[in-house]
Image (cartoon, rainbow, N blue to C red):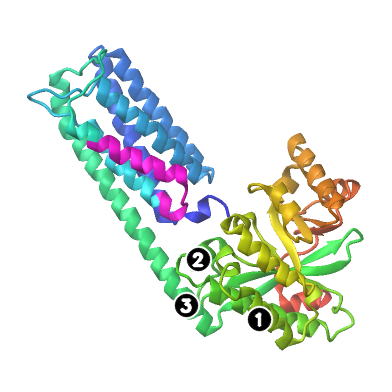
């Protein structure tokens, strides 16, 4: 999932509007302070403007999460410094700059809902704590240079109005994000009932380009609507607690496909990979439900591969290990997806009954022009070979990439070069689909 797909269009727009508003405000004050001969204050406002412009550039390039983190951390430091050095209250005029910490905390909370992290929680807590402290005390640093009262008289009103407006924008963005999640959750529940989900199949090939299997990829097209990106609806399904039901439907559909493939000489050799989320894998009885489906559909368990990301591994290592051993005991393959993008990968390779490593597409797509990515891909392939694991490269799009991977011992490939994800009928009859 890219950073942009974690957020709604309206949320990103609200964030950009807020960044532009702060930029405009800081330019205004930079001019005022420059005219008053307060060079240090003017430079601080110019610095704030540059920060906002940088955050806008990051957001426009799709790095929204990075932009949010940078903005929050830098503004937190900036506001605290402004309050302790320049915005010093007196008997006539209160301190006002600290109220910007409230919309800052709101921005953090919105991001936390879309992208929970310890760092984000820490930024929210520090913003609120700083607001309370600066509201409750007149403390200033010993070397403080208070702004002149004739400027602060206007600043109290201008900053209060801007901070209030920013808070309103944040509340609106939060409301939009919550409504979007609720709406998606209701639609996802209806999608199961209305049979709106479909599996698409992306070919996996060997060194000779021969098909050895496929990855089943979930797709959703609401009735009468446009397709919804998995990067958008899967997180919503996770938040709504629907991933277990949707994941079970995926497994059922995959088992039926394997059962049908076994009836044909052309497809009975194919394996099928199915992605399983952490919440689904950790459900009580998940492994039993998989074994029951294998028995119900009468499929060869060695033709099924369950793909897990490292987020599953860190959730509850002991339970994950036990479940994996149960599934491996009957021959079901276990693949570690997006290898190299998570944590403690070497520990997982040593302790868990894995059968395949999947090299993340981000490394594959940059390895031909990035020495570090190339070295990392070589290391992953060699590591897999040493541990007697199959190694499959994702996101393969060029012959140059195939050549590099083949020379370094990679055994299997998946990517647009060999086929895009297509409906089952097109996958089973690729020649007819190509002709059409």
Q: Please give the name of the residue rendered at 50% of the width and 73% of the height, measured from the top-left corner.
A: 242
Q: Which residue is mark 3?
A: 189
Name the residue that disc number 2 marks.
238
Q: Nearer the viewer, residue 35 or 368?
A: 368
Q: Which residues are magenta?
A: 111-132
Tag 3 or tag 2, which sits nearer the N-term? 3
Q: Is residue 265 magenta?
A: no
- Please tell me whether residue 388 is drawn above or below residue 261 in the rendered image: above
Alpha-carbon span between mark 2 and mark 1: 19 Å
Above or below — where is 57 with respect to 307?
above
Q: Give the mark nearest the N terminus, 1 or 3.
A: 3
Residue 292, percent from left and from top: 68, 83
Q: Main secondary structure of the magenta part?
A: helix
Does the stretch in magenta take in 119?
yes
Q: Nearer the viewer, mark 1 or mark 3?
A: 1
What is the quadrant of the C terminus in the image? bottom right
Tell me residue 170's x, y (percent). 31, 49
Under tag 3, what secondary structure?
A: helix
- Pinpoint residue 419: horizontal percent, then vertical percent: 77, 64
Residue 151 in the figure: left or right of residue 25:
left
Relative side of 393 to 35, left or right: right
């Amino acid at each position: 999932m890219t950073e942009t797909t974690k957020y709604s269009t309206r949320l990103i727009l609200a964030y950009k509007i807020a960044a532009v508003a702060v930029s405009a405000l800081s330019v205004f004050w930079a001019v005022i302070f420059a005219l008053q001969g307060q060079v240090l204050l003017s430079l601080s406002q110019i610095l704030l403007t540059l920060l906002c412009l940088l955050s806008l550039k990051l957001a426009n390039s799709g790095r929204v999460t990075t932009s949010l983190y940078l903005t929050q951390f830098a503004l937190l430091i900036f506001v605290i410094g402004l309050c302790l050095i320049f915005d010093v209250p007196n008997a006539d005029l209160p301190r006002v700059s600290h109220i910007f910490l409230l919309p800052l905390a709101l921005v953090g909370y919105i991001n936390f809902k879309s992208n929970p992290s310890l760092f984000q929680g820490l930024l929210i807590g520090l913003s609120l704590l700083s607001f309370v402290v600066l509201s409750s005390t007149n403390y200033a640093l010993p070397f403080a240079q208070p702004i002149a009262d004739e400027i602060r008289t206007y600043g109290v009103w201008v900053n209060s109005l801007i901070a209030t407006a920013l808070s309103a924008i944040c509340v609106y963005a939060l409301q939009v994000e919550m409504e979007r999640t609720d709406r998606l959750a209701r639609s996802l529940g209806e999608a199961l009932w209305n049979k709106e989900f479909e599996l698409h199949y992306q070919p996996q090939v060997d060194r000779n380009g021969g098909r050895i299997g496929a990855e089943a990829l979930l797709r959703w097209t609401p009735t009468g609507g446009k397709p919804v990106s998995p990067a958008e609806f899967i997180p919503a399904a996770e938040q709504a607690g629907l991933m277990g039901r949707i994941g079970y439907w995926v497994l059922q559909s995959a088992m039926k496909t394997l059962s049908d493939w076994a009836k044909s000489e052309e497809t009975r050799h194919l394996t099928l990979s199915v992605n399983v989320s952490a919440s689904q894998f950790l459900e009580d009885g998940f492994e039993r439900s998989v074994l029951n489906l294998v028995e119900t559909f009468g499929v060869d368990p060695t033709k099924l591969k369950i793909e897990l990301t490292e987020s599953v591994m860190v959730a509850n290592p002991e339970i994950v290990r036990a479940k994996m051993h149960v599934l491996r005991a009957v021959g079901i393959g276990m693949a570690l997806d997006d290898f190299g993008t998570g944590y403690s990968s070497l520990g997982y390779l040593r302790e868990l009954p894995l059968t395949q490593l999947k090299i993340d597409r981000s490394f594959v797509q940059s390895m031909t022009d990035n020495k570090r990515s190339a070295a990392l891909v070589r290391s992953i392939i060699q590591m897999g070979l040493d541990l007697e694991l199959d190694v499959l490269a994702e996101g393969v799009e060029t012959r140059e990439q195939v050549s590099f991977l083949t020379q370094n011992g990679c055994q299997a490939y998946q990517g647009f070069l060999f086929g895009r994800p297509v409906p089952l009928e097109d996958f089973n009859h690729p020649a007819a689909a190509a002709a059409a």
